Image (cartoon, helix red, strand yellow):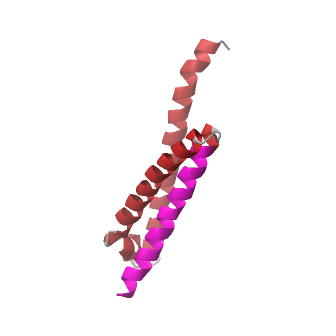
Amino acid sequence: MQVETLGVLIPFAFFALVFGSLYIHLTTRNKERLAMIEKGVNPEIFTQRPEEKSGYGTFKFGLFLIGVALGIIAGYFLYEAGMDETAAYFSMIFLFGGIGLVVSYLLQKKLEKR
């Protein structure tokens, strides 16, 4: 197979894989829900969880993105200080993103106690 043909087939294969995965996920979920409803399970379990309704998901996502932005800034400073570029950026992005998620968890628990 020539290289030009592979260059065309790879994007098609990628989108076919994504489409196939989504199709299987959605059809399986639908069959599972129908079976549960037939057995008499309460259909309210399919609705959103209370923390998603209250905006905690958005709060968590926002703090995560703030952490990622701080990680990029910290990675830049580490890179300028002489650290390897890839290691500096990736380590700080993961570190500060994780810190953002932990902070959102702690703040969520604090707000739930009130």
Query: Residue 15 at x, y = what percent?
Result: 50, 34
Q: Residue at x 64, y 42 (%)?
A: 83
Q: Residue furthest bottom?
A: 114
Q: Residue furthest front?
A: 81
Indicate left or right for 78 with 69 as reference: right
Q: Which of the pair 59/89 is nearer the observer? A: 89
Indicate left or right for 78 with 100 as reference: right
Is residue 36 shown above or below 90?
A: below
User: How many numbered marks are there?
Assistant: 0
Query: Residue 7 at x, y = what percent?
Result: 57, 19
Is residue 84 shown above or below 65?
A: above
Is residue 67 shown above or below 104?
A: above
Q: What quarter of the picture does the N terminus occupy? A: top right
Q: Residue furthest left?
A: 54
Indicate left or right for 6 with 15 as reference: right
Is residue 100 rendered magenta in the image?
Answer: yes
Range shown magenta: 88-114
Q: Residue at x 47, y 72 (%)?
A: 105
Q: What quarter of the picture does the C terminus occupy? A: bottom left
